[in-house]
């Protein structure tokens, strides 16, 4: 395994100008690991942003095929990281080896997927309206549009996915695919992991001849604000808490040049259990729901934090079944002490609320998270009580019982924006409750039928986003190939000679793109 230096990555070089040292920690024991990381100074933050800005013209000027080679090379380097790397990630996160191996495959897989997007070329969004010189009363000029990368992107890593949402995760992959150099703020919960992944990125950059500064990484607390405020940064990608994401949004909006922040933040991911499903398979639903709640110690952005059902003897029995299964679940180690502390604070808010009843779960104590089950009065949801809307990040969920179909719709209308919503039902349920889809479309980014939200496929169709506070911008996604759209902007060329046009817009169509030409999709040459 490569030696861990703990130095910042700036413009293809390592830098350790700062005197503040931060340490990585074994998530299971709390013991410090034998690595020291130099917190970036304000001058180093600025140098990292400037290095990305200096790399931007050359990097975005590369052909899509060259950038695809870079992404494929990153994927190869990630796949080559050995068992010692897996063991280190496990120590920093307390996640099992099988989970980390799978996450590594997902991380390299999404790099290769974005490489395919680049070779496919549809990300250009090429549009051509040819000149109409004879048009009356005024002729139409020749107009051609495509999309380019916004510029340097600041990316903040997530704690709960140390690979797939971190150093070489989806935000980094989509930004690099768009032609945007990256300045990555390493997450304090897995800095050694971040360094080894950053090393892999740099090796891939050097092997494929990418400009120095295409990828940069800084360590430390309190450095994110300076990064977001630096004028070279043109967009921000973030996965984390509502408080952290909202702070970044406010910083970015207050800049002399405001920039977009694409933040994935808070979601309670409601699960709606309909009557016929309870009649047909209550026990299996109870088991599967419980498994989803406690999977990965509940440390998923899509963890089901709210379960809604219609009052009936069957629903009451179902609640008791889930309570029994939750009570049987073992405690689990969380990602770090900070996450465990936040989980405990979230539980205390639920326990202290007069409208919420504790149904199952051992007293939260010690250094592991105890699974919990609560039941809340439906009025809290209808009236928009903030306690019920807040994500409790960990292995817990809250049941809500509604009186009837009309109150179900009222309760769902009371929800804030979410990443997901799940409907558990039988065909007869879907007929009777046909209004749910249209209602949920307004509230969430992904609607599931007879599945569970923990598990996000990386593909063209996936949406991992949703209305605020699930994300800061519901028009995008942080998972799937549509994620590239966040870091692109359109540019139009009017009356340009063909020789000066980018290849995506040349009349001969040298890239073989499927383009919108005079209102019709076409891959033909215009010569």
Image (cartoon, helix red, strand yellow):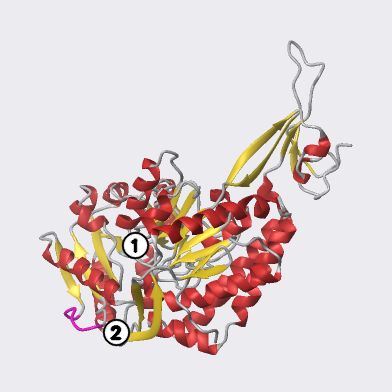
Q: CA distance from mark 2 to mark 1?
A: 46 Å
Overall secondary structure of the magenta section: loop
Q: Is residue 102 above or below residue 56?
A: below
Asked whether residue 482 appears in the rendered view, the answer is no
Task: Name which quarter of the figure residue 1 lies in.
Answer: bottom right
Residue 19: which quarter of the image?
A: bottom left
Q: Residue furthest right?
A: 527
Which quarter shows the C terminus? top right
Q: Secondary structure at mark 2?
A: loop
Asked whether the beta carbons under mark 2 and mark 1 sit within 8 Å of each other, the answer is no
The image shows residue 379, relative to residue 166, as above or below, that is above
Q: Is residue 295 left or right of residue 134?
A: left
Residue nearest the viewer, comparing 402 with 280: 402
Query: Residue 489's x, y, as percent?
Result: 59, 42
Q: Nearer the viewer, residue 170 or 331?
A: 170
Tell me the tag on residue 30.
2
Q: Nearer the viewer, residue 486 or 404?
A: 486
Q: Which residues are magenta?
A: 362-367
The location of residue 119, given as percent across then percent down, is 73, 58
Q: Residues within 10 Å of mark 2 (few under 14, many from 20)?
A: some
Which residue is located at x 42 percent, y 55 percent?
Answer: 227
Secondary element under disc 1, as helix, strand or loop, is helix
Residue 455, x across and y down, in percent: 47, 69
Q: Does 366 appear in magenta?
A: yes
Residue picked out by circle 1: 275
């Amino acid at each position: 395994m490569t030696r861990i230096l703990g130095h910042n990555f700036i413009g293809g070089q390592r830098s350790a100008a700062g005197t503040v040292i931060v340490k990585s920690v074994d998530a299971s024991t709390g013991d410090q690991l034998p690595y020291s990381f130099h917190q970036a100074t304000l001058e180093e933050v600025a140098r990292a942003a400037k290095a990305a800005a200096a790399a931007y013209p050359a990097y975005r000027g590369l052909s899509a095929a060259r950038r695809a080679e870079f992404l494929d090379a990153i994927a190869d380097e990630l796949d080559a990281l050995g068992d010692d790397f897996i063991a280190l990630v496990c120590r920093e996160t307390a996640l099992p080896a099988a989970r980390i191996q799978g996450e590594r495959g997902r991380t390299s897989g999404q790099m290769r997927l974005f490489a395919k997007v680049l070779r496919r070329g549809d990300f250009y969004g090429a549009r051509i309206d040819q000149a109409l010189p004879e048009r009356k009363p005024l002729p139409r000029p020749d107009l051609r549009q495509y999309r380019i990368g916004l510029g340097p992107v600041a990316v903040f890593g997530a704690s709960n996915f140390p690979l797939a949402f971190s150093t070489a995760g989806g935000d980094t992959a989509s930004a690099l695919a768009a032609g945007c150099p990256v300045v990555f703020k390493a997450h304090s919960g897995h800095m050694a992991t971040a360094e080894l992944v950053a090393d892999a990125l740099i090796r891939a950059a050097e092997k494929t001849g990418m400009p120095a500064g295409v990828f940069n990484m800084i360590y430390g607390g309190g450095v994110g604000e300076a990064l977001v405020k630096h004028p070279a940064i043109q967009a921000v990608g973030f996965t984390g808490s509502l408080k952290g994401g909202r702070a970044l949004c406010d910083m970015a909006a207050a800049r002399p040049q405001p920039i977009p922040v694409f933040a994935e933040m808070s979601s309670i991911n409601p699960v709606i259990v309909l009557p016929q499903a309870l009649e047909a398979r209550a026990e299996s639903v109870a088991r599967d729901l419980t498994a989803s709640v406690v999977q990965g110690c509940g440390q998923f952005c899509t963890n089901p934090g709210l379960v809604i059902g219609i009052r009936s003897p069957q629903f009451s029995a179902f609640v008791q079944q889930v309570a029994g299964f939750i009570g049987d679940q073992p405690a689990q180690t969380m990602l770090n002490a900070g996450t465990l502390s936040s989980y405990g604070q979230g539980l205390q808010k639920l326990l202290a609320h007069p409208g919420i009843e504790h149904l199952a779960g051992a007293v939260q104590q010690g250094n592991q998270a105890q699974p919990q089950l609560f039941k809340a009065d439906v009025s809290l949801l209808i009236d928009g009580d903030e306690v019920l809307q807040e994500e409790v990040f960990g292995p817990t969920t809250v049941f809500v019982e509604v009186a009837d179909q009309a109150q179900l719709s009222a309760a769902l209308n009371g929800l804030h924006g979410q990443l997901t919503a799940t409907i558990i039902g039988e065909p007869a349920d879907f007929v009777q409750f046909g209004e749910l889809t249209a209602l949920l479309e307004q509230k969430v980014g992904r609607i599931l039928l007879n599945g569970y939200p923990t598990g996000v496929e990386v593909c063209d169709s996936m949406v991992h986003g949703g209305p605020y506070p699930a994300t800061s911008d519901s028009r995008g996604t942080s998972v799937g190939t549509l994620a590239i759209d966040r870091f692109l902007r359109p540019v139009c060329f009017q009356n340009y000679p063909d020789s000066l046009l980018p290849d995506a817009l040349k009349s001969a169509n040298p890239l073989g793109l499927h383009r919108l030409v005079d209102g019709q999709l076409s891959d033909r040459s215009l010569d």
